[in-house]
Image (cartoon, grey):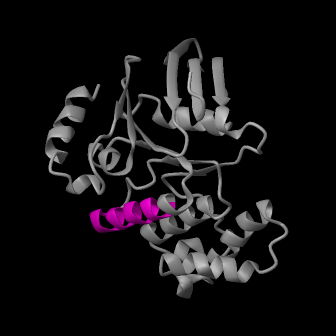
Amino acid sequence: MLGKGLEIHNLNKKYKSNKTQKLIFNNLNIEFESNKIHCILGKSGCGKSTLLRIIAGIEKYDDGNIIFNDTKGEKLFISMVLQDNNLLPWLTVYNNIKFVLKSVNKNIKNYNQTIMDFLKKVDLTEYKDYYPYQLSVGMKQRISLLKALINNPNYVLLDEPFSALDYITREEMHDLFLKEYNNKKFTSIISTHSIDEAIKLSDYIHIIGKDGKYKKIKNTLKKPRDKDSDYITFFEYIKSEYM
């Protein structure tokens, strides 16, 4: 057992529909080290999104234990970023961020300065009065990421948040995420089906197969990992393990 971090023991999950049922997890065991970036890599239907929702507490599971070792004595705070963003359509960009900020930090004296400082990080200050429908997909995902990080959560869960972005925007989002991680050092779990993304972002890659197989691989490449001379070799290794 780990001294710190998140442990999942003997997790079982089934989806039931009429007279049929689909087994998602059968005694799944995973350990996520604290203050590291973890990527859950797997093909569609392997249960990546389900696992994140279970960790976030928004979906039930049939049996097993989920233990947050590194938050004993502290309030557990989990943020989640979805693929389709999680912006409230009836609020402006500014008020979307303010809504989240006030929900946790009610004693902040200057909300405006905090919000504008965050918007400046992603060069979106001029869009503060825009509504979500007026923003591009990339803009909305940048705002969603800021919302998830602004209250300094213990855990940041990302459910394929970059998959709908074009190549350039996705690379910019990767860089923004890594920059914020280096500043705040939270524990993050990211679901993805992209081997490139998993290698670039993660400290550990957790490969989940549809047949219930699971393997954890430590990312030994030097940062920035996509520039490491052994990148291609490591990529081919992960590809060979992709179940």
User: As drawn, is 235 to the left or to the right of 177?
Assistant: left
The answer to whether 46 is drawn above or below residue 57 in the figure is above
Does the stretch in magenta take in 176? yes
Q: Residue furthest front?
A: 3
User: As drawn, is 68 to the left or to the right of 192?
Assistant: right
Whether residue 62 is visible to the viewer of this picture, yes or no, is no
Q: Residue furthest bottom?
A: 126
Work out whether residue 231 or residue 58 is closer to the camera in this orientation and state it. Answer: 231
Which quadrant, please, contains the N terminus? Answer: top right
User: As drawn, is 100 to the left or to the right of 39?
Assistant: right
Q: What stretch is highlighted in magenta?
A: 166-180
Residue for point 75% across, 78% down: 111
Quadrant hosting residue 54: top right
Work out whether residue 185 or residue 61 is closer to the camera in this orientation and state it. Answer: 185
Quadrant hosting residue 44: top left
Residue for point 72% across, 43% down: 76
The answer to whether 217 is drawn above or below residue 211 in the figure is below
Does the stretch in magenta take in 46? no
User: As drawn, is 9 to the left or to the right of 106?
Assistant: left
The answer to whether 175 is drawn above or below residue 200 in the figure is below
Residue 192 percent across, percent down from the top left? 39, 43
- The secondary structure that dominates the magenta segment is helix
Residue 158 percent across, percent down from the top left? 51, 49
Which quadrant, please, contains the C terminus? Answer: top left
Residue for point 54% across, 62% down: 145
Residue 106 percent across, percent down from the top left? 84, 66
Q: Residue furthest right?
A: 107
The answer to whether 111 is drawn above or below residue 79 in the figure is below
